[in-house]
Amino acid sequence: MSEERAFTCLQQEEIEKGRKDGLSEEQIGLFARHEFNYLQMQEIRLALEAGKDSRLIQKAAVSWIPAREMHEIFAQTETAIPDIPEKKKRKIPVRMVAAIGAAGSLAVLAGMAFPEKKELKLELTAKEVRIPCGETFHPENYVHACSQEAQLILPEEITADHPENRLAVYRAKTNRQEVQQILRVVFEDLEPPEISLKLREVQSIRGAPFSCRLWLNRAYDAVDGDLSDEVECCDELGEETEQEVVYALSDHSGNRAEAVLKVHLIDIEPSSPSPESPPSQPSVTPSIPAPVQTPAMEAPAPYVPPAEEYYYDVETVTETHGSDGGETSISWGG
């Protein structure tokens, strides 16, 4: 079984440019061939990205057309597909045939004298591997076979928290030869999100408004984070006594999760009114005015004149006695 030939670094670079620019794997397959050199691959890739007619590209994507002629073919603006030159068959002169025969004989003799050059062997277990986000890619796990005389150079370990594509380049080399193989590593989100509810079973009054989001606690995904706002549920309830409300959520990678809330509907009967009784007369308590307290005024003390101060009233009475009209004064004090 012949060993598959690896692309050169420049050829691999054209393939990766096509993937980054959004070309499909089918489109990339039009130029990702070993018979094209990297310049031919570049012209085909640019034509695909420019939206050229796929029939024209398929017809012109042949190895015997140089890259410069490909460029001229793809640059034409005519709607009709131009004629594509066919591969020319070379006529070999008779003398050249004889020379080739002689050279072949010499090659056989040289092969008998010198051992055939042994090609390096480097085989991987697959062309593409898929790993869950958060896990680590270990390159040594994907080597199937390698020549014993060659030095095997492994790519570095890879880890990704979000979905993405990486390329891991394996190389095997000796002093005279070197081969490489490329492994595509696809990190993908395989874990579904988680939906947690505040309760698993609740009661609700029949006919009363119901809110399903009231019982949602959280929705979380290890890659996309909090997705509580993206949870879908229904607030409408039927007439059955026992019902289930389904909470559904899909993360950004398409992983789906569900949670179920059991709802038990209850009926509340209106309370019967009590027989009417005559209204009772409210008791009236006469209000008694609060006594008003008047501060007692003390009686004024009798006036006592200061000590050692005396006042005397003197009244003079004059009496006339005798014929002579003499006056006799009599005085008294009080």
Image: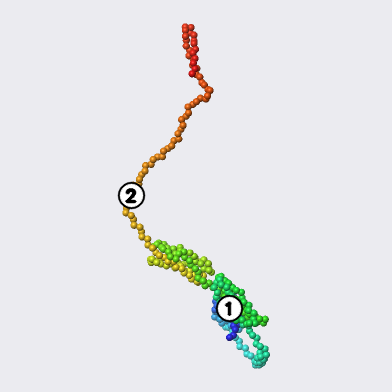
Tell me where residue 259 appears, x and y as whole percent.
46, 68
Tell me where residue 209 appears, x and y as whole percent.
41, 62
Q: Is residue 110 visible to the viewer in this orientation of the structure?
A: no
Residue 6 higher or lower than 289, as above or below: below
Determine whether the residue tagged by mark 2 lies in a helix, strand or loop: loop
Determine whether the residue tagged by mark 1 lies in a helix, strand or loop: helix
**Residue type beneath disc 1:** Tyr
User: Residue under circle 2?
Assistant: 279
The answer to whether 148 appears left or right of 202 in the picture is right
Residue shown at 48% from the left, 66% from the top: 196
The answer to whether the residue labelled 2 contacts the one labelled 1, judged by CB atoms less than 8 Å apart, is no
Question: Seen from this angle, which residue lies furthest front?
Answer: 307
Q: Where residue 196 is drawn, which disc sits there?
A: none
Residue 310 higher or lower than 191, as above or below: above
Q: Residues within 10 Å of mark 1 (few under 14, many from 20)?
A: some
User: Residue under circle 1?
Assistant: 142
Tell me where residue 317 appears, x and y as whole percent.
48, 14
Nearer to me, 233 or 219: 219
Residue shown at 52% from the left, 21% from the top: 310
Tell me where residue 305 appears, x and y as whole percent.
51, 25
Rounded to the nearest angstrom, the CA distance separating label 2 from label 1 is 95 Å
Location of the N terminus (image quadrant): bottom right
**Residue type beneath disc 2:** Pro
| Between discs 2 and 1, the one toward the N terminus | 1
Q: Is residue 91 visible to the viewer in this orientation of the structure?
A: yes
